[in-house]
Amino acid sequence: MTLTGKVDITLDEAGIAVISFFHPSHNSLPGALLNELAQTILQAGKEERVKVIVLRSEGERTFCAGASFDELISIQNKVQGMEFFSGFAKVINACRTCGKIIIGRVQGKAIGGGVGVAAATDYCFATQQASVKLSEIALGIGPFVVGPAVERKIGLSAFSQLALDATEFRSAAWAQEKGLYAQVFETTEAMDAAVQAFAAKLATYSPDALAALKQVFWQGTEHWNKLLVDRAGISGTLVLSDFTRNFIQDFKLK
């Protein structure tokens, strides 16, 4: 747990592990929280008692607002920049390699890195409030780290639309049509009931079969350990630009 956010995990008798993260600034993810989230996912993947993982955030309006602006503006050099953006790489790669099926629960807006986290789950539920936006290019950095995960889920054409139309939200219905969300619900209560029922069903399946199926789902991503870190280097360099620093300062003054 950190002073500015937290990651929690619970495990019920059926073997359903619920990993939840929270940050008071719209569930943005500073580096310490990203590292803790990645480690929690990896550890749950090693637990034999865990049959399936549900990944969620707390609060009602925002699933995840992506990178922490406070931390972005504090980055002073390329090494620090690469280290910060590698946090999102760690979370995506943890979801990819943990060996357990991960169900996403997206109750509100997903922005930037938040879209990447949703895309890194294996089956994602959402509400009608769960609109998506990749705002990175407007900041001057681009969605380089989360890009492979998002493109894998929705295809290059839809990813390019999100990446370039960086100031506009796309609806949850759009995200479902493109394959990011499997199911979309009118209310959080209806979504949670569906998440619980689906998780309970998966928990009764063969763990070995689920693990093998997960490998099939992620086939062709074995190089992501290097790819996503390389991409973090691109963002870590761009974040030092005057364009990005001026944008963040102006945003924080609003």
Image (cartoon, rainbow, N blue to C red):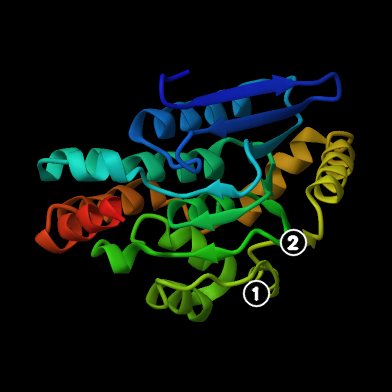
Residue 137 is situated, as x and y percent measured from the top left of the image, at: 31, 68
Residue 209 is situated, as x and y percent measured from the top left of the image, at: 78, 42
Residue 101 falls in image quadrant: top right
- Please give left or right for residue 254 compared with residue 76 in the image: right
Q: Which mark, by number, is residue 233? A: none
Q: Which residue is located at x 69 percent, y 46 percent?
A: 105
Q: Which of the two residues, 22 or 60, is positioned nearer the viewer here? A: 60
Q: What amino acid is found at the position of numbered circle 1 in the picture?
A: Trp
Outermost residue, front side: 254
Q: Which residue is located at x 57 percent, y 35 percent?
A: 98
Q: Mark 2 to mark 1: distance in Å?
A: 11 Å
Give the crowd class for mark 2: few <14, some 14-19, many >=20 residues within 10 Å: some
Residue 212 falls in image quadrant: top right
Residue under label 2: 182
Q: What amino acid is found at the position of numbered circle 2 in the picture?
A: Ala
| First along the sequence among labels 2 and 1 | 1
Q: Is residue 108 visible?
A: yes
Query: Tags 2 and 1 in contact by the CB under 8 Å rule?
Result: no
Q: Which residue is located at x 13 percent, y 52 percent?
A: 240
Q: Secondary structure at mark 1?
A: helix
Residue under label 1: 174
Q: Secondary structure at mark 2?
A: loop
Q: Is residue 34 above or below residue 11?
A: below
Q: Which of the two residues, 51 or 2, is positioned nearer the viewer here? A: 2
Give the crowd class for mark 1: few <14, some 14-19, many >=20 residues within 10 Å: some
Q: Which residue is located at x 34 percent, y 62 percent?
A: 136
Locate the C terminus and report the quarter of the image it occupies. bottom left
Q: Is residue 185 above or below residue 51?
A: below
Q: Please tell me whether mark 2 or mark 1 is closer to you in this view.
A: 1
Residue 252 is situated, as x and y percent measured from the top left of the image, at: 28, 50
Residue 46 is situated, as x and y percent measured from the top left of the image, at: 61, 24
Q: Is residue 142 visible?
A: no
